[in-house]
Amino acid sequence: MTKLDKIKKEAIETHIPIMMDDTLDKITEIIGSRKLHRILEIGTATGYSALCFEKLLDDDGIIDTIERDEERIAKAKSNFELMKVKNINLYEGDAAEIIQTLDNKYDMVFIDANKGKYDFYLDHALRMLSEDGIIFADNILYKGYVMSGYNLHKQRTAVTHLRNYIKKSTEDERLESKIYEVGDGLEVTTWKK
């Protein structure tokens, strides 16, 4: 078992939500042989997905990742240390605040954080997306609630914002978006060519 497999296994055993294998496979397939220079990840958790994305980078590529949960930050830091990575910047704090302070150009943005803020993250992701960049929104179908008539109070805010995200990304004439039924739903958005 590799170190990365151990990180994945521990996250699953401790019920930390991580990117599913078929989601990673789809992202890797879409990126193809292209090497990315800069990736933004919104929602680090224990660092598993950032570590998976590292193989998509060019030689001097960088991943900026944001997490607010202190226990997950500590675990991500220890996982990055374990894997001896030097090209992952971990921003500690609320993604909704931090994202407003960033102004890099990103080849890829991976959104996997507070579902109630997805449409807000989209606006900032587009502001920083390179000309041939790709935005991946993970868990976009949210247990099937998003495309159903679901309207129960408990998840209503998350579902409403995810629906807004889909509406924004599919109705914006500058964008091309597609939803894949992998994991809990993955939306892929690019600038129209």
Image (cartoon, rainbow, N blue to C red):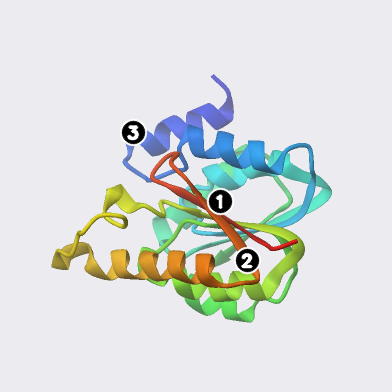
Specify whether 77 is left or right of 150.
right
Q: Secondary structure at mark 3?
A: helix
Q: Residue at x 56, y 76 (%)?
A: 123
Mark 1–mark 3 distance (CA, rounded to whole Å): 19 Å
Q: Residue at x 54, y 52 (%)?
A: 178
Q: Which residue is mark 3?
A: 13
Residue 107 can be seen in this image? yes
Q: Which residue is mark 2?
A: 175
Front disc: 1 or 2: 2
Residue sitting at the far top: 1
Q: Give the amino acid type for the residue marked by disc 2 in the picture.
A: Leu
Q: Which circle's residue, 1 or 3, is located before the other in the chain?
A: 3
Specify whether 189 is left or right of 70.
right
Q: Which circle's residue, 2 or 3, is located before the other in the chain?
A: 3
Counting from the top left corner in percent of width and height, residue 2 is at 58, 23
Specify whether 61 is left or right of 148.
right
Q: Are marks 1 and 2 in contact (CB under 8 Å)?
A: no
Counting from the top left corner in percent of width and height, residue 158 is at 31, 66
Counting from the top left corner in percent of width and height, residue 174 is at 65, 71
Front disc: 1 or 3: 3
Residue sitting at the far right: 59
**Camera-nearest residue between 52 and 189:** 189
**Is 87 above or below relative to 79?**
below
**Is 102 above or below relative to 181?**
below
Q: Secondary structure at mark 2?
A: strand
Q: Which residue is mark 1?
A: 77
Q: Are marks 2 and 3 in contact (CB under 8 Å)?
A: no
